[in-house]
Image (cartoon, helix red, strand yellow):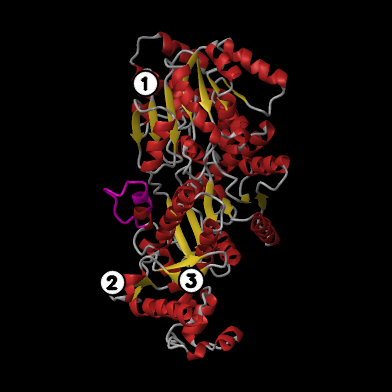
């Protein structure tokens, strides 16, 4: 591989006597086009570049990749990046090559001769970064290859995959502890965007990184607005979200089943909204095609199971929607974190109902897993339900789950802050429900799901009630003051609090572990009135579509220049067959328009314009700008 335009300044910096911090800053500016580090980035880079190990917990969009990319460029040799994301390695390498970094990958998609060529590049010292999957790295042959190479570091990305209790457990990650023994002189950095305190401890132990320095950034993503609304007709609710707030914008919609994925994608397309399905049941080539189209297109929506998304580096995903309840807060945070990586306002939206609670409980209870696994799954679900049913700030609740509750106040940018829910004293209603469950079991030997229990509470005759003479029970009709929807809302919240439980294959209701104090009137049960779905409070009404959101603050003349640059960027991306953001991000285009450079040198001062992109695109950008001049 020929040396990159970035190689010369990097070599000069390595050979000089500058302090490492200044060297790292100069690489940040020269190669990546940024003027300053964020948060703990500088400290992490110093730790690893000086030969130390690091465990890094940093939210999606926080700049984790720089924490191993820059040390790899500072240190002699090649940085080895361990990643489970085989399908995305090609794009990750292309993004690095776009800024002049010598990168490659070794995975099962390569032909034998292609893999051999990459291995020779590694041994010849011609690579700055090499990506590979964990199952390849732990092979004896691969470790023998690495022993013959000069290694700068090992970066273990998506490190939460080592946790067997996490939402993305990958067994192959368990073998990565061998790196400490096989390569004791090579620094290691483990990175993840999703880890509770327990997962943090587990990944530290399993990767044998007890002596590493730990860096835990805030998990807060203030640009994301969290909203959860009652599920009624979820696809219609999703359609309303897209057409009133995110028309023409890229988004991800998560569904629990493959069938729901297919039907939802078809429903969106039928309404003229470009959408593609993604799930494990599709042919691998189809999945790859849909993923690549999503990464490269503007305004495309992907409808997927949780099989999609890890490592997706598309900065302009404006919304993530869930049509079914996620199994854990870790999964929810990871999935919603794929929105707004560029820092622009984005939405994390979910439709959630009683059926979600019952189906998730049933899935856990009827599974063939060990009781320990089931207990852990119930704990994850309980935390997820608590987030859904909270009447306080969702962001504070979310951060609290990750052990970061200290120092955070109500955010003002979630639905419970923007439209605080009304509450009511539901103690008597809860007692009536529990009494009905107890009487049905004791006097009739029967247990029912929510539907029949509500019929008994409201005194509504049906075939089952008539056959079992439910009208003779003392609890018949004692809850007629509430309508069916109100009872369903109450039961959903009581399930979340453990006052009632859904049991077995059919999700029959039984008194929960918290029922006793309620029946004895030792506690007051405050429940939320079901929320009416709210539009976003960011300006009300229809929102600006597509990439134009980034340019909302621009003057009319500047917007014309912005659109001209977008058109130029699209043509370049199509010609190179890369996603538009790999040319320049929307934020960089806005920076160019606002600074209005008149020379290549002035263009180089814009954030996000590194040396290689300046050399490759500088003149073309300057030529594109005058076409929008309307002063």
Per the image, label 1 sits on a secondary structure element best described as loop
Residue 192 in view: yes
Q: Position of residue 512 (x, y in %)?
A: 40, 67
Residue 70, given in percent of the width and then of the height, sits at: 44, 23
* Circle nearer the N terminus (1, 3): 1
* 55 versus 425 height, above or below: above
Instruction: Give the mark, 2 or 1, whose residue is nearer the N terminus.
Output: 1
- Residue 391's disc is none
Residues shaded magenta:
398-412
Please say if the residues under marks 2 and 1 sit with CB atoms less than 8 Å apart.
no
Question: Tag on residue 509?
Answer: 3
Identify the image quadrant of the N terminus.
top right
The image shows residue 523 at horizontal and vertical percentages of: 28, 71
Q: Which residue is mark 2?
A: 523
Mark toward the viewer: 2 or 3: 3
Neighbor class of circle 1 (other Cα within 10 Å; few <14, some 14-19, many 20+) is some
Q: Tell me: 94 left or right of 438.
A: right
């Amino acid at each position: 591989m020929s040396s990159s335009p970035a190689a010369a300044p990097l070599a000069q910096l390595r050979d000089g006597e500058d302090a490492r911090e200044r060297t790292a800053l100069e690489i940040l500016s020269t190669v990546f086009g940024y003027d300053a580090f964020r948060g703990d980035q500088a400290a992490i880079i110093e730790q690893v570049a000086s030969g130390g190990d690091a465990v890094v917990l940093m939210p999606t969009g926080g700049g984790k990749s720089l924490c191993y990319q820059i040390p790899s460029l500072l240190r002699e040799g090649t940085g080895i990046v361990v990643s489970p994301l085989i399908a995305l390695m090609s794009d990750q390498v292309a993004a690095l090559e776009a800024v002049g970094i010598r990168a490659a990958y070794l995975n099962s998609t390569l032909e034998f001769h292609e893999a051999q060529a990459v291995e020779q590049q590694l041994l010849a010292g011609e690579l700055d970064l090499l990506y590979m999957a964990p199952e390849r790295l732990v092979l004896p042959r691969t470790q023998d290859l690495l022993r013959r190479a000069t290694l700068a570091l090992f970066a273990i990305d998506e490190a939460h995959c080592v946790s067997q209790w996490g939402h993305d457990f990958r067994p192959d990650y368990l073998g990565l502890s061998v790196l400490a023994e096989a390569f004791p002189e090579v620094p290691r950095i483990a990175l993840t965007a999703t880890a509770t305190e327990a997962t943090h401890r587990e990944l530290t132990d399993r990767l044998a990184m007890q002596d590493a320095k730990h860096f835990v950034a805030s998990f807060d993503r203030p640009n994301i607005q969290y909203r959860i609304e009652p599920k009624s007709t979820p696809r219609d609710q999703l359609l309303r979200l897209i057409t009133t707030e995110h028309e023409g914008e890229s988004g991800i919609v998560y569904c629990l089943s493959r069938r729901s994925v297919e039907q939802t994608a078809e429903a969106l397309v039928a309404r003229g909204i470009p959408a593609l399905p993604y799930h494990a049941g599709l042919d691998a080539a189809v999945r790859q095609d849909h993923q690549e189209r999503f990464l490269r297109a503007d305004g495309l929506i992907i409808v997927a199971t949780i099989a999609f998304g890890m490592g997706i580096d598309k900065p302009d995903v404006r919304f993530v929607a869930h049509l079914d309840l996620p199994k854990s807060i870790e999964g929810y945070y990871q999935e919603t974190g794929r929105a707004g990586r560029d820092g622009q306002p984005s939405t994390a939206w979910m439709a959630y109902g009683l059926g979600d609670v019952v189906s998730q409980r049933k899935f856990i209870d009827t599974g063939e897993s060990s009781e320990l696994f089931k207990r852990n799954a119930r704990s994850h679900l309980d935390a997820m339900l608590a987030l859904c049913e909270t009447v306080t700030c969702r962001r504070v609740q979310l951060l609290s789950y990750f052990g970061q509750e200290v120092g955070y106040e109500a955010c003002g940018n979630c639905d419970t802050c923007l439209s605080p829910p009304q509450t009511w004293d539901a103690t008597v209603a809860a007692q009536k429900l529990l009494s009905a469950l107890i009487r049905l079991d004791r006097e009739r030997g029967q247990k029912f799901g929510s539907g029949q229990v509500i019929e008994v509470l409201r005194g509504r005759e049906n075939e089952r009630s008539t056959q079992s003479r439910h009208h003779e029970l003392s609890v018949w009709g004692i809850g007629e003051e509430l309508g069916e929807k109100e009872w369903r809302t109450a039961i959903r919240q009581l399930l979340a609090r453990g006052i009632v439980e859904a049991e077995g294959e059919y999700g029959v209701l039984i008194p929960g572990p918290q029922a006793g104090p309620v029946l004895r009137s030792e506690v007051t049960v405050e429940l939320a009135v079901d929320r009416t779905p709210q539009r976003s409070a960011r300006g009300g009404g229809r929102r600006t579509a597509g990439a134009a959101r980034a340019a909302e603050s621009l003057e009319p003349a500047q917007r014309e220049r912005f659109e001209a640059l977008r058109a130029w960027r699209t043509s370049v991306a199509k010609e190179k067959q890369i996603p538009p953001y790999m040319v320049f991000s929307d934020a960089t285009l806005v920076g160019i328009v606002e600074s209005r450079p008149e020379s290549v040198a002035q263009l180089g001062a814009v954030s996000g314009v590194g040396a290689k992109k300046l050399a490759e695109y500088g003149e073309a950008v300057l030529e594109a700008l005058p076409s929008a001049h309307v002063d």
